[in-house]
Structure formats: C-alpha cells, structure tokens
Amino acid sequence: MIIDFSCTNFRSFKDKAEFTMKADALKSKVDNTFEADLVLGNSVSLLKTAVVYGANASGKSNFIKAFLAFTWLIKNSHKFELDKPKINCYEPFELDVNTQKFPVNFKISFIIDHIKYDYEVSFDAKVVVHEKLDFSPKGQISNMFERKLTETQDYDVIQLGKNLTDKRIPKKVFKNQLYLSKFGIDIPHQQLTPVFRYLSNINVWNAYDKFSISELANEISVLISQKENENLKNRLSKLIRISDTKIESIASKELKREDFRLPNVIPDEIANEFFENNKVKTFSYHKLFDGKKEVGIKEFDFNKKASTGTKVLFALGGKILQTLDSGGVIVFDELDNSLHPKLCKFLVRLFNSKISNPRNAQLIFATHEVTLLDKDVFRKDQIWFAQKNNFGSSEMYCANEFEGLRDDTNFELWYRSGKFGGNPKIKEIEFIYE
C-alpha cells in the first residue's frame, strides 16, 4: 500500500509536491479507509481512493506523469547503455533558470508484508545523483542500501545496510542506472526483489490516450481468454451489462493463423508479428429478437462494433477488477474519459467497498468531472487539488486544509464557487477581442 509520494523539480512542479494516502482521524465513511498492520502491533490508517482536481495546465496530469516516470525508470533503467547515458524521463521545471539543469527527485513510502519502506531517487539527464532505500523491520528505520557517488566515469558504489540479508551481491552500478532495477532483471534477492516488484507493478494509465487504452484493452483481452481468469471475465461481463450497453456478455478467443487469411506476399517476419499481436480477439454477445420475441444470441467483433465508451469501460473496468482481485495500486489520468459520471462514481465505490475490495487495493486518479465530488463518495482527506502560482509552478493541496469544511459539506458547490481554487480563470470576452 502507498503511504506517501512526492516529486520535486518535475515538469510543472518546481518545489516539492507532497501527496499522502494517510487517513485523518475522521469518523465519517470509515469504509473508505483501512488499517494497514505494521510490525510490533503497530498500524497506519490509509485511504482506499484519492482524486485530484485542477484547471487545464494546473499540473494534475503532471502529478500522474510523475508516477509514470518513477515506475518507468525503475522498470527500464537496467537497459540504459553506458555510452548512451541519457535518462529519457528527466523533465525538470523549465520556467526558472535555476532549476533547468537541477535533478528531479521522487520519494515514496509504502508497505509490503507489514513492513514500511522509504525509497528515494534523484537524477538528471545523464546520471543518478542519489538513491536510497530504507525500511523498518523492527519498527525503527534502518537502511537497506544507499548510493555513494564516485569520481570514476562509469560507476557508483553501493553501501549496504546492516539489516540487509545476503550481502553477496554486486556493489557497483553504472551511473545512469538505478541499483534497485538490477533486482527485478539481473539479480534475485530475498529482500530487494519484492521491493522492485511492488514499485514496478504500480499501474499508471492515461484514459485519454487512445494508444494507452488500446494497449490496456489488449492486455485485458489476453487475461480473460485464459481459463484461470474465468471469474474476472464474468465480473467484467456483469460490469458491462449493468452499464446499460445492451451487451449480455463478453469473451476473448485465441484465433488460429488461418483465420486471418494474410496475403502470401507479406514477409514471414511481419506476418508472424501481426499474428502474435492480434491472435486474441474479443467478442460481445447481444440478445437476438424476432420482433419483440427473444430468439437467441448474436456474436459481434467487439473492437469493430462496440462504442468508444464501451471500449474504454472494457479496458479500465477490466484493469480495475483485476486490481481489486489481486490488490495493489492503480493510477489513472482522466478516469472520466468517455464514461458517464455515474459509471465513474460506481468504479470509485468498488474500491471503497469491503465486499469488492477485500485486499485494500488503492485507486488514485485525476479528473475534471465535478459531479464526482460527492460527499457520499469521498471524505475531505481524499480530495486533492493542483494549481499554478504566479511563477508558473504547480502546487498540490488537500481539501482537509480548508477551515470550515466538514464531511457533510457540498464539495461540488464549494469547487464550482472557487472556494477550493483549482478552477480555470477564464478572461472576459472584451479582454480577448480588445
């Protein structure tokens, strides 16, 4: 479970932007929270969901992109070549001459198997300048490893903590690679590999990006085609059916090569790649009628016949249901894209419910849809805002910082009236046409 996350000098965030999933000591909507047990009988109260609002270009999407850049770096830095040191996700704040070449910093606190971890990394365009992993196996903070910069051209040295088991591991890492990345690809380790796996499995998706949705839809298609995921397929069918799509069920099948009838002139290499990327196809099933009499079921190619909104629901809904089943963290930008507000609200409630979320999976998302600001869905500590200051730098703040705000307050009315900030300041017509 995620406890805290922060980013500094990343895209529109010049100063440190701090975000937390810690729950306040509120008595309302207790189902929206859970107690995460720690060692020695301790615990921390965490939120299951959090939402980020803000005007266009306020920084809310950049906050989601910070999650994406962080997880991308963990998953991919092991591939960086020594002679090609560029770190592609280095995007510093560019509206201040003092920060344009400063390092980007990410820090996250999380829990695995009742133990709290803190991982921090800073990097610029070519090298990692700081990397540190702490944990609290006995209730007190202990270092697992810390990067020590060297004057050599190629590598840094890693100092291992006293509570890290099995120290027979490499203690050098190329300057443009994360040390943690080694333990998900090259080197198995009893303590470090679970940390890599947890952080790299934080799912970050942009619901407005057609390519991203298509990629996710393909992933869900493959999942529900497998027999061991029959329950996921059935739940996704029910979700699509209750969304008034007139679809009775969905299913995915693995097609045979001859089903594609590819022209012989296509080179084998291209044909093989096409088949591997398209061999699983999703179908939807609708009631067939003779007048007003139901006479059977009609099969359709889901990708060709389904509406854009239904395709988005298939992709996002499938990933959400999978996360609810397995636990973990999922992060969305523009969750409301192509989905009805009532449906978005229902998806959020799936996370807040003990029935549908027994593993305490967490959902973090950014949206413009103000009708989701429902006091019956969110507590005030679950609502966040992004806003730019006069210097073009984004800032993050939580609704619980506002005096006089109660959990029975009409959050939507407060937001529309500008009491929270985070609303676009649209200039007058006369100003535009003067």
Image (cartoon, helix red, strand yellow):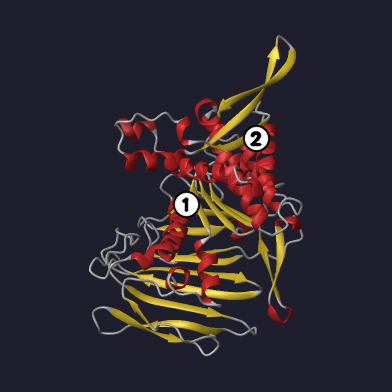
**Which quarter of the picture shows residue 83?**
bottom left
**Within-10-Å neighbours for mark 1: few <14, some 14–19, many 20+:** many
In the picture provided, is 267 more to the left or to the right than 198? Answer: left
Q: Which quadrant of the rendered structure holds the C terminus? A: top left
Residue at position x 29%, y 59% in the image = 94
Task: State how far apart marks 1 and 2 are (Cα).
Answer: 29 Å
Residue at position x 28%, y 66% in the image = 125
Q: Amino acid at mark 2?
A: Ile
Depicted 329 relative to depicted 335: above or below: below
In the picture provided, is 182 more to the left or to the right than 320? Answer: left
Dot 1 falls on a residue whose secondary structure is: helix
| Residue 62 is at least partly visible in this image | yes
Considering depth in this image, is 63 or 414 the residue closer to the camera?
Answer: 63
What label does residue 60 carry, if any? 1
> Could you tell me residue 221's position as x and y percent?
55, 41
> Could you tell me residue 17's position as x and y percent?
47, 64
Q: Which residue is mark 2?
A: 240
In the picture provided, is 290 more to the left or to the right than 340? Answer: right
What label does residue 105 carry, if any? none
> Could you tell me residue 114's position as x and y percent?
66, 74
Depicted 326 relative to depicted 372: above or below: below
Q: Which quadrant of the rendered structure holds the N terminus? A: bottom right
| Residue 209 is at least partly visible in this image | no
Q: Amino acid at mark 1?
A: Lys
In the picture provided, is 404 more to the left or to the right than 178? Answer: right
Dot 2 falls on a residue whose secondary structure is: helix
Depicted 331 relative to depicted 6: above or below: above
